[in-house]
Amino acid sequence: MVVGFEALEGGKKRVMSLYWRMRAEFRRQVMRSYKKQHSFHYDPFSYARNFDDGVSSHF
Protein backbone atom coordinates (compact mmCIF):
# COMPACT_ATOMS: atom_id res chain seq x y z
CA MET A 1 0.00 0.00 0.00
CA VAL A 2 1.48 3.32 -1.05
CA VAL A 3 0.51 6.45 0.82
CA GLY A 4 1.00 9.85 -0.77
CA PHE A 5 3.44 12.34 0.70
CA GLU A 6 0.61 14.79 1.38
CA ALA A 7 -1.17 12.25 3.58
CA LEU A 8 1.96 11.66 5.63
CA GLU A 9 2.62 15.37 6.01
CA GLY A 10 -0.95 15.98 7.26
CA GLY A 11 -0.58 13.17 9.80
CA LYS A 12 2.72 14.59 11.03
CA LYS A 13 1.09 17.98 11.61
CA ARG A 14 -1.71 16.38 13.61
CA VAL A 15 0.74 14.38 15.70
CA MET A 16 2.84 17.47 16.42
CA SER A 17 -0.27 19.47 17.26
CA LEU A 18 -1.37 16.77 19.68
CA TYR A 19 2.13 16.69 21.19
CA TRP A 20 2.18 20.45 21.84
CA ARG A 21 -1.32 20.44 23.33
CA MET A 22 -0.46 17.55 25.64
CA ARG A 23 2.80 19.22 26.65
CA ALA A 24 1.02 22.49 27.46
CA GLU A 25 -1.63 20.69 29.52
CA PHE A 26 1.04 18.73 31.39
CA ARG A 27 2.85 21.94 32.28
CA ARG A 28 -0.40 23.54 33.46
CA GLN A 29 -1.10 20.57 35.71
CA VAL A 30 2.42 20.64 37.15
CA MET A 31 2.17 24.35 37.91
CA ARG A 32 -1.24 23.93 39.55
CA SER A 33 0.03 21.15 41.80
CA TYR A 34 3.18 23.15 42.63
CA LYS A 35 1.13 26.17 43.69
CA LYS A 36 -1.18 24.04 45.83
CA GLN A 37 1.72 22.39 47.62
CA HIS A 38 3.38 25.67 48.51
CA SER A 39 0.39 27.68 49.68
CA PHE A 40 0.22 26.39 53.28
CA HIS A 41 0.43 29.00 56.03
CA TYR A 42 0.57 28.69 59.81
CA ASP A 43 -1.85 30.52 62.01
CA PRO A 44 -0.03 32.79 64.54
CA PHE A 45 -0.61 30.47 67.52
CA SER A 46 0.83 27.43 65.74
CA TYR A 47 3.80 29.48 64.53
CA ALA A 48 4.53 30.69 68.08
CA ARG A 49 4.51 27.10 69.36
CA ASN A 50 7.52 26.36 67.15
CA PHE A 51 9.60 28.62 69.41
CA ASP A 52 8.34 27.24 72.71
CA ASP A 53 11.33 26.71 75.00
CA GLY A 54 9.28 24.83 77.57
CA VAL A 55 8.61 27.83 79.79
CA SER A 56 4.91 28.45 79.88
CA SER A 57 3.77 31.99 79.41
CA HIS A 58 0.16 32.89 78.76
CA PHE A 59 -0.95 35.81 76.66
Image: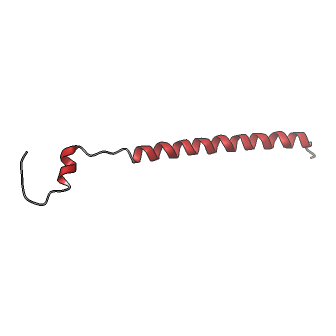
Asked if residue 57 lies left or right of residue 49, the reply is left
| Picture mark count | 0
Please say which color scheme the image uses. Answer: secondary structure
Q: Position of residue 48 (x, y in %)?
A: 18, 50
Task: Give the residue at x 91% y 43%.
Answer: 5
Image quadrant assignment for residue 44: top left
Asked if residue 5 lies left or right of residue 35, the reply is right
Q: Position of residue 19 (x, y in %)?
A: 68, 44
Q: Quadrant of the C terminus?
A: top left
Q: Position of residue 14 (x, y in %)?
A: 76, 39
Asked if residue 6 lies left or right of residue 48, the reply is right
Q: Position of residue 53 (x, y in %)?
A: 13, 60
Task: Give the residue at x 58% y 41%.
Answer: 25
Task: Give the residue at x 45% y 47%.
Answer: 34
Q: Is residue 51 above or below residue 1?
A: below
Q: Give the residue at the far bottom of this rendering.
A: 53
Task: Give the residue at x 82% y 39%.
Answer: 10
Asked if residue 52 lies left or right of residue 38, the reply is left
Image quadrant assignment for residue 21: top right
- Front residue of 6 and 32: 32
